[in-house]
Image (cartoon, rainbow, N blue to C red):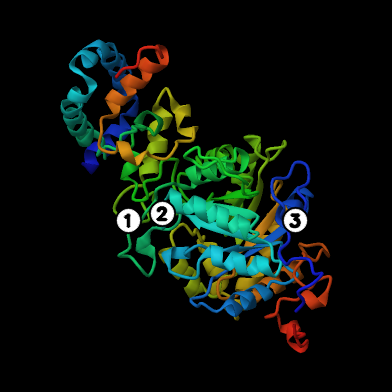
Amino acid sequence: MYKVRRWVVRHSRFFEAVYRTFEPVIIKLHPVWKRIGYGRVEAPVRFVEKNVKGFLFDCQMCGKCALSSTGMSCPMNCPKNLRNGPCGGVRANGHCEVEPEMRCVWVDAWEGSQQMKGSDKIHAVQLPVDNRIKGSSSWLREVRQVVETHDPDSPAN
Amino acid sequence: MKFDDEPVPGYSLPILPGHTSPGRFERVLRAGKFAITSEIDPPDSADPAEVLKRAAVFDGYVDAINATDGSGANCHMSSVGVCSLLTRVGYSTILQISCRDRNRIAIQGEILGAAAMGACNLLCLTGDGVQAGDHPQAKPVFDLDSMSLLETARTMRDESRFQSGRKLTSPPKLFLGGAANPFVPPRDWRPHRTAKKAAAGAQFIQTQYCFDVPLLREYMAKVNDLGLLEGPNRIFILPGIGPLASARGAKWIRENVPGVHIPDAVIKRLEGAENQKEEGKRLCMDLLQEIREIPGVSGAHIMAYRQEHAVAEIIEKTGVLEGRVPWYPGRDNPEDLNPESPDALSSTPETV
């Protein structure tokens, strides 16, 4: 919902803190995910992720969540799906070139990012989305990635 | 026309140390000259003569010609087609690629094809939304964005591989560029975004139309503070300018063309003039003079849509080239003139 996601961006620092608490928890649960099997746990986790993030951020389930680098404003809501900042068509009132009623996702992202501890993360170049992972849980992927980088000998699969 | 003992039109120059492309445009910039670029509005036609005719207008006045890629989301001849035609007679071109119409497979193929046809410069753009053009019912692609396009092109050039990792046998030797619009929100981010583009591979920047010099000055100062204008990986910034045809036209552009910021003072100046078209040109010349004085500016990009003939006058009267005559086919040897150049009409082609 547009109003909710605008509210979230205004409180980006709070949501950053929430995520910072939440991330280690799901990573700690790795043995549980592994025991159930990442394949089997994918569907329920995806369901929760889709609904929670859908409500808060209008998440499009791109599979490669960048919210902590984009001021908690989901870049996939940009009609051009830009992942690295605003295009040159932003209107003088800060609204979108394509959808004049909507505030530019990246104008919001900039404001949101400046309130966050990780305000520098918005300057890092984001790689394009891998279309194969669209619709899958980015939480579980994150866990697997973290576990694999810390302990490359024990693949999370 | 000759077929023997003739340098191939559009031949590449040796790549000098510190350069990445075999093109003239990069050489002019790195030599510290004030560079001028302009753009061709590609024809709605399959006739190569129309492209050459449009290029001949700039003979002796520009260092490179941008070939737009479906500008304003309107359908025209492809930028690769235009570049190929122009490099065949020796013009220095800037290939524009927008992310709106093609996915990464098509774009990377296009980069190789264009480089093989002699395009030495690539301007990586996001592209206008499809709603702005003549095919609003089209599917917007946006598989990449301008930043990841830059990164992809740089990877192809420097690491000689596709985004997939697959090796290229011969990489495209390109001078890479991006766009900037310092005149629209979020303005305090715009210099940082340029820095991000530089990090992704941009070596030159062409900006949106500038009608507000103080804003440009502010942007240039911040870009300089970020250290982007020095060192071997420095970027070259060419602000965009152009003549406005009338106050009414200016108002229309302001309201209908996304991203063009025109201050009220500009419109008032045009309204107060007897001949608005002449005043538009004079305004453009004034802007060019002012922009040239801003520290760190490396040149100017003149976009004179439907007033292409005015470019020569603007450059001539402002004297920004300081007597330099940028190379064009036939500059040193009239036999090599662009066949569609008005000066070429007198000479009859030899039979083969």
What is the chain identity of the residue bearing mark 1? A
Residue B303 in view, yes or no: no
Q: Amino acid at mark 3?
A: Phe
Q: Amino acid at mark 2?
A: Arg
Query: Do the residues at discs 1 and 3 belong to one chain?
Result: no
Q: Is residue B266 above or below residue B204?
A: below
Q: Which mark is residue B231?
A: none
Find residue A141 and report its horizontal and vertical position in percent.
31, 25
Residue B154's image quarter?
top right
User: Between disc 1 and disc 2, whose residue precedes?
Assistant: 2
Density class for disc 2 (Cα within 10 Å; few <14, some 14-19, many ≥20) is many
* Image side of residue B40 versus residue A6, left or right: right
For the residues bearing labels 1 and 2, Cβ distance under 8 angstroms: yes
Q: Residue at x 17, y 24 (%)?
A: A40
Q: Which mark is residue A91?
A: 2
Find residue B153 and report its horizontal and vertical position in percent.
55, 45
Q: Is residue B21 above or below residue A45?
A: below
Q: Is label 2 in a helix, a strand or a loop?
A: loop
Q: Nearer the viewer, residue B69 or B283?
A: B69
What is the chain identity of the residue bearing mark 2? A
Find residue B146 and report its horizontal and vertical position in percent.
49, 47
Q: Residue at x 31, y 36 (%)?
A: A133
Q: Which mark is residue A100?
A: 1
Q: Which residue is mark 3?
A: B34
Residue B48's image quarter?
bottom right
Find residue B240 and report its horizontal and vertical position in percent.
60, 58
Q: Is label 1 in a helix, a strand or a loop?
A: loop
Q: Disc 1 or disc 3, which is closer to the eye?
A: 3
Q: Amino acid at mark 1?
A: Pro
